[in-house]
Structure formats: structure tokens, C-alpha cells
Image: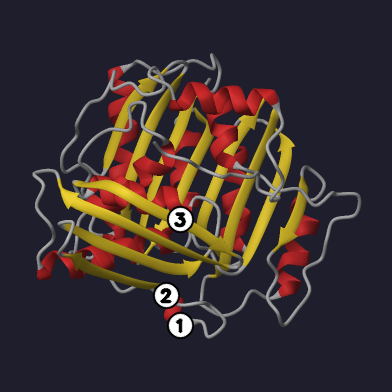
Amino acid sequence: MDVFHVTDHQGNKITESKTIDYIEKALGPKGQTADGLNTWPGKRVGVHTIGDHSAIELIGRDRPGLLSEISAVLADLHFNVAAAEVWTHNRRIACVLYVNDDTTCRAVDDPARLSAMEEQLKNILRGCDDGEKVAHTSSSMGFTHVDRRLHQMLFADRDYEGGGLATETDSPCTFKSKITVEHCVDKGYSVVNVRCKDRPKLMFDIVCTLTDMQYVVFHATISSDRPYASQEYYIRHMDGCTLDTGEKERVIKCLKAAIQRRVSEGLSLELSAKDRVGLLSEVTRVLRENGLAVTRAGVTTVGEQAMNVFYVRDASGNPVNMKTIEGLGKEIGHTMMLNVKKAPTSAKAPEASGWAKTRFSFGSLLERFLA
């Protein structure tokens, strides 16, 4: 039997009946389905349909302004981006975008139009690759949780082997993750111990990675002593064998990558505006023109309202100049609401007047969007 003691993002007890009902249904016997799963081995771009949207998967080498180029291509081809999740890690980028026709608001089923879109997106990603490594994905998202799918894409792309522009060791104020793998002789398990800075979805990221590496978790102990987390997993191969020495090193590298993928240093820009065709293209263009590189992004639409979060850094690698953010606010403030969070310690971020400090949870928003 598994027992989980959980709270909401603010650390409060969950009392809302809708949330409790959703958890019960999601964890119940009908909560998981494998219908609609396809495979696209070796592709940079994959497309499939979910309801009234086409889901696009992209993976390749990251560079400043890439998300702007991708969204511009989609806008030029009359695709509207209704939701998206974008992760970057070790100079690689993985995206899952939900698009539809900008006039009918329905999924696009014209093979010629989809083929043209795929080819243009591939050309953009080819421009990112320098021959050292090409993108690779192993399966489509289907009904897989979007965060799980992003982990799968980056894992298949072997992002854990690359050296990124910044890692947790580059920042003296960041608690360095400590991961060990030992052998439990008495019980015949390999024991994975993880101690790192706690954050939402940490357990999710670790368990997804172990599962995608074809390991079975038999027992686990999870504890949180804010701001740190301690997690212990007793694992074996699917055939019942424990890990050998070479596998231990690979597990450590893969888990470190899984922990780091969702961590974003620098500024978080939360934008809210009435949804319209080309909005993502406009916002990412403005960010690019102001010298900001997007390291992670969440885009969703609830009703007529677009709610976007962009984690950004200076494209040259320097701390973000707050004058840049002030100019950004003046440029887009007349059409959308902007909230700046996670400001550098050297400066205080300007806050839009009348804008409450809110916290977006894009996992739940995407689930509502796809419902």
C-alpha cells in the first residue's frame, strides 16, 4: 500500500472536492490509458491529433530566439498556439505545442499543410544543429502527461551527457544535488538516495526517469525538510536484477538531469492577455528583440484568456538588466498584464500596479485545457 501526505502549492491542506475527485479518478483503474500511442523514431518533429488540436513535438539544439522563430513559422502558416510547454537543458530544447487552425479553431487534418509545417520547422532545427548531435525521439505523446513526455524526449536525446551553459555547480547559492546508488545485499535491491533542494514535482521527475530507464521501484521513502528533500528508492531491473557499476553512474547522471530540467534561474515573466492569433509569436519576438533568451515556458488558454509564463535570461549570459524589463513592460503593457518574479539579488524587479502575486500551475491548466 502506498501512502502520500500532500499539500497544495502554498503548503495548505487540500480541501476542494473537485481536486480530491480528480486525484481519485486519475489514480483509479481508469486513470491511465494507452490508446492512441504512436512511434516516430529518429524525428526532430512529430505531429498527431488530440481532440480539436494538433500536438507538435520538437527537439533539437537550443539557441537564443529559437522559440520566436518557431512561433513565427506557425503564425505565418495560420496555426494558432493554444497551449505549449518548453524546456531547455544542456543546450537542448524540447517543446510540446498544441495548435489548431486560426480560423476554424479545429485540428488541421490537411496532409499537405501539415507536411509543409513540418518541413519548415525541421529547417529551423537543422539550423541549430552543428553536427555534434542530432535530435531523437522514441514515441509520440499520445495521452502521456506533458511533463512526462518532455522528460522522455530529453532522455532519448541524451541531454544528460552534454555540458550546458549553466549547471547547479555554477551558482554558489544553489544547493548541490547529492545522489548515490548502493547495493542492499540482504534484500537484493539497488538503493538510490537523492538529497537536493525541494520543489514541486521533484518526486514526479525522479520516478518518471527511473521508469523510463526500465527500473521498477519496489519501496520508497520520501521526506521534505524545507528547503531540502530526501528521497530513497529501492529498485531493480524489470527482470529482477540489481544495477552493475556502469549503470550506477548512468543513473546518477540521468537523475541529476531530471532534477535540473525544471529548475530555472533568473527572471520569471508572467503574462496575461486576451487570447488572439499570433500572440505567442508577438511576445517571443519582443523578448528576442530585447536580448532575452527563453529557458523554459508554459503557455495555455483558459476561455478567452491566454496565461503565459516565460523564464528568461540575458542572451549573452549576463544578469538581466532591470532597465530591459522596464522597457519590456512599457512595450507590451498596453495589451497585456506583466508580472515579474524571481528577480536577481542585485536588483528588485518592478511590479505592475494592481497585479496580484499569483502562482500559475501549468500542469493543472493544461489538464483543464485538454479536458
Tell me which residue sits at (75%, 78%) in the image.
347
Tell me which residue sits at (29%, 46%) in the image.
152
Q: Position of residue 40 (x, y in %)?
A: 19, 34
- Please say if 179 is above or below 273: below
The reply, left or right, for residue 51 in relation to residue 41 is right
Q: Gap in Å between the C-alphas at discs 1 and 2? A: 5 Å
Tell me which residue sits at (38%, 66%) in the image.
194
Q: Which residue, given by chain and number where applicable, does mark 2 sit on? A: 167
In the figure, residue 321 lies in which quadrant? bottom right
Badge 1 amino acid: Asp
Badge 3 amino acid: Ile
Q: Which residue, given by chain and number where applicable, does mark 3 sit on? A: 222
Q: Toward the viewer: 257 or 323?
A: 257
Q: Position of residue 137 (x, y in %)?
A: 23, 44
For numbered disc 1, what is the local secondary structure? helix
For numbered disc 2, what is the local secondary structure? loop
